[in-house]
């Protein structure tokens, strides 16, 4: 620990904070902020959310006994101060690095992390389960869920509130309201929570009511006076409390979320509520205390490496567009030609590249909030009326909407296009965020078609193809830059179920899915140089329907197949190839080696580190080709 952090360096257990004075908490908040900025500038991470909750974290730790009470963070991207103050300060520099601290709370990481998170809106449900477990065990500790206003837009959060109110369990929900999701929060709820608006609204409503009462003959003036005296209750009736009280929560707030004294006072008040759940409404500023993040909280929500003094990115861009950029621009171009295209995102306009669409076609753009299930069924509704909705959701978050994909889209064979960004290994966000499962969870659904572009140019063609299809179609593409290939001409429609031989060859046939095709090509050239034979490299393009003709042909020409996919092997693309070959009786004389993700959750690390770890990088693919070829030689000998 560096010496500039005297107070932070002195904390070994969160219980120490209970004895801290107001000025000590102020100093601690300052040190914690500096340390967060310092480490995130080097490792990247969720800066603005964590800066916004520093005082809230200090107040929670100073008020509750965390050796007994259970604190549950929603999403967990705002928990850096919590990590620093719960015995992890000495490892904080390893945040989000291979083998280091996770960017999110994890049960396995600390006894103070009671629930693993990364996906949003789970905190109230999990905390309620813990409250019931506590009561069944006859214990008395507090259970506290901290949820953001963005996370509160999700159905699951409301399902939690609904059951909590019904069960009447002792439970504290802290609403961290900064009026932001990643970008500005959306929906009727966010407007309702906004006190500026509600104050204006209350004033207008009050004026209207008073005017109405005054107009009542004879007793009007008296009625108006009576109503004005009741102003206090009138106000509390028409403020956010009304919503939570309808769910049978006691409501406290709104409270200044950067004033530790005020926070502690109100947290104690919340803790004293004995007869049911209570919601403490805290108002915070995202990015608080770091000027660049306060000025642009969306950019600093999750950020790469930057210079702490200026906030500027450390390295300039390579000039090669990301898959997300190309997707956003292509969608725009296609939408200019087809008015039926509607873009739907679940709280990720910037992350999915649909922000361009939002600017150009605001009336054809819908941000549903963090509501993946709703987004999918909403898109199904649009598709049923002749529109061509494009649902842009990260691979990992679409997991939420599995039944909606099956029941609302595929069963009715509706032409919804799913654009799965961040498919495959995402890197530092780790196990909760890798797009490991989409091939496995989509390919077995009848009517679903799946495309995996190998580079940014193919992404354009895949998107055009999906949109031209009269059936549900998913396009999966990875996080990060493309390959710098030229983007010439208009996006074209690809022949259904046909792959592309990228390199003809002999000895070993390599089938490489999506972003693994280029490394497989590099590997093949390397093998040719080193071993004197040139393997065939095939890009299936279509994961469903399978490129059956080419697969059949390869099975007759080769006796060694290597299949590479950046997704789980269990039930993934290579499984479908094995099934196909087996069912056609083509497997007998084939030796098949598969490279993909194992049947375990993949941790955080850089994308190159993780790819190497699982044999997915060019060098490892070359090694696998060489090993397979050698095996053949041995077999022949
Ligand atoms: C199911 C799911 N969808 C999308 C995301 C991506 N995501 C991470 S944080 C976030 C915004 C959360 O907003 P809020 O709860 O208000 O917290 P804040 O960042 O404002 O502190 C989103 C959309 C996610 N983590 N989980």
Image: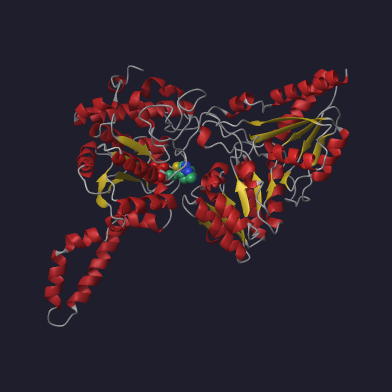
Q: How many numbered marks does the figure carry?
A: 0
Estimate the x, y position of residue 225 in percent, counting from the top left.
12, 70
- Can I make out residue 455 in this image? no
Query: Where 343 sits versus 131, above or below?
Result: below
| Viewer-proximal residue among 246 and 8 | 246
Estimate the x, y position of residue 91 in percent, counting from the top left.
41, 21
Residue 557 found in image quarter = top right
Whether residue 381 sits left or right of residue 582 in the image: it is left
Residue situated furthest bottom in the rendering = 217
- Can I make out residue 68 in this image? yes
Q: Quadrant of ligand 1?
A: top left
Residue in view at x 47 percent, y 23 percent:
100
Estimate the x, y position of residue 110 in percent, counting from the top left.
39, 27
Residue in view at x 63 percent, y 62 percent:
340
Query: Where 412 sits versus 310, above or below?
Result: below
Query: Where 286 sits versus 392, above or below?
Result: above
Look at the image and name its color scheme.
Answer: secondary structure
Estimate the x, y position of residue 186 in percent, counting from the top left.
43, 54
Whether residue 317 sits left or right of residue 550 in the image: it is left
Q: Quadrant of the N terminus?
A: top left
Residue 196 found in image quarter = bottom left
Q: Quadrant of the C terminus?
A: top right
Residue in view at x 51 percent, y 53 percent:
373
């Amino acid at each position: 620990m560096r010496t500039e952090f005297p107070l932070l360096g002195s904390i070994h257990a969160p219980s120490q904070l209970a004895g801290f004075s107001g000025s000590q908490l102020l100093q601690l908040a300052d040190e914690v902020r500096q340390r967060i900025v310092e480490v995130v500038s080097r490792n990247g991470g969720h800066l603005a959310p964590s800066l916004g909750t520093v005082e809230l974290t200090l107040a929670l730790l100073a008020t509750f006994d965390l050796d007994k009470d259970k604190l549950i963070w929603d999403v967990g991207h705002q928990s850096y101060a919590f990590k620093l103050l719960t015995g992890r300060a000495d490892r904080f520099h390893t945040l989000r690095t291979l083998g280091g601290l996770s960017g999110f709370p994890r049960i396995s990481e600390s006894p103070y992390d009671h629930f693993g998170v990364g996906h949003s809106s789970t905190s109230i449900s999990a905390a309620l389960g813990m409250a019931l477990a506590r009561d069944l065990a006859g214990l008395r500790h507090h259970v506290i869920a901290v949820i953001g206003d963005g996370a509160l837009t999700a159905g699951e959060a409301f399902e939690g509130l609904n059951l909590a109110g019904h069960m009447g369990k002792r439970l504290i929900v802290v609403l961290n309201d900064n009026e932001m999701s990643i970008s500005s929060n959306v929906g009727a709820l966010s407007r309702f929570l906004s006190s500026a608006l509600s104050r204006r609204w209350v004033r207008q409503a009050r004026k209207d009511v008073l005017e109405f009462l005054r107009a009542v003959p004879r007793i009007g003036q008296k009625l108006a006076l009576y109503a004005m005296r009741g102003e206090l209750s009138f106000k509390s009736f028409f403020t956010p409390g009304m919503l939570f009280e309808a769910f049978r929560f006691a409501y406290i707030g709104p409270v200044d979320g950067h004033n530790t004294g005020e926070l502690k006072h109100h947290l104690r008040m919340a803790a004293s509520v004995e007869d049911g759940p209570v919601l403490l409404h805290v108002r915070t500023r995202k990015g608080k205390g770091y000027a660049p993040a306060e000025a642009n909280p969306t950019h600093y929500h999750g950020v790469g490496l930057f210079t702490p003094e200026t906030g500027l990115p450390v390295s300039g861009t390579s000039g090669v567009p990301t898959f997300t950029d190309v997707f956003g621009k292509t969608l725009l171009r296609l939408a200019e030609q087809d008015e039926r295209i509607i873009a739907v995102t679940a709280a990720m306009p910037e992350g999915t590249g649909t922000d361009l669409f939002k600017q150009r076609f605001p009336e054809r753009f819908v941000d549903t909030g963090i509501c993946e299930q709703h987004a999918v069924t909403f898109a199904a509704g649009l598709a049923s009326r002749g529109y061509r909705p494009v649902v842009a959701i990260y691979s990992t978050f679409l997991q939420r909407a599995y039944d909606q994909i099956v029941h609302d889209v595929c069963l009715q064979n509706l032409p919804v296009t799913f654009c799965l960004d961040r498919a495959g290994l995402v890197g530092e966000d780790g196990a909760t965020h890798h797009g490991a499962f989409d091939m496995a969870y989509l390919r077995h659904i009848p009517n679903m078609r799946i495309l995996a572009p190998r580079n940014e140019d193919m992404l354009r063609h895949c998107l055009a193809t999906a949109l031209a299809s009269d059936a549900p179609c998913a396009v999966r593409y990875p996080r990060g830059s493309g390959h710098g290939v030229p983007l010439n001409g208009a996006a074209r429609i690809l022949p259904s179920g046909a792959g592309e031989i990228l390199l003809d060859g002999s000895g070993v046939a390599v089938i490489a899915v999506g972003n693994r095709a280029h490394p497989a090509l590099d590997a093949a050239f390397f093998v040719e140089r080193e071993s004197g034979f040139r393997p065939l490299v095939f890009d299936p393009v279509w994961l469903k329907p399978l490129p059956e003709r080419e697969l059949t042909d390869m099975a007759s020409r080769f006796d060694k197949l290597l299949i590479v996919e950046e997704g789980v092997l269990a039930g993934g693309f290579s499984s479908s190839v094995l099934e196909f070959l087996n069912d056609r009786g083509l497997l007998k004389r084939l030796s098949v080696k598969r490279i993909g993700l194992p049947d375990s959750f993949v941790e955080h690390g850089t994308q190159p580190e993780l790819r190497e770890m699982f044999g997915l990088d060019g060098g490892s693919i070359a090694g696998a080709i060489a090993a397979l070829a050698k095996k053949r030689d041995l077999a022949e000998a």
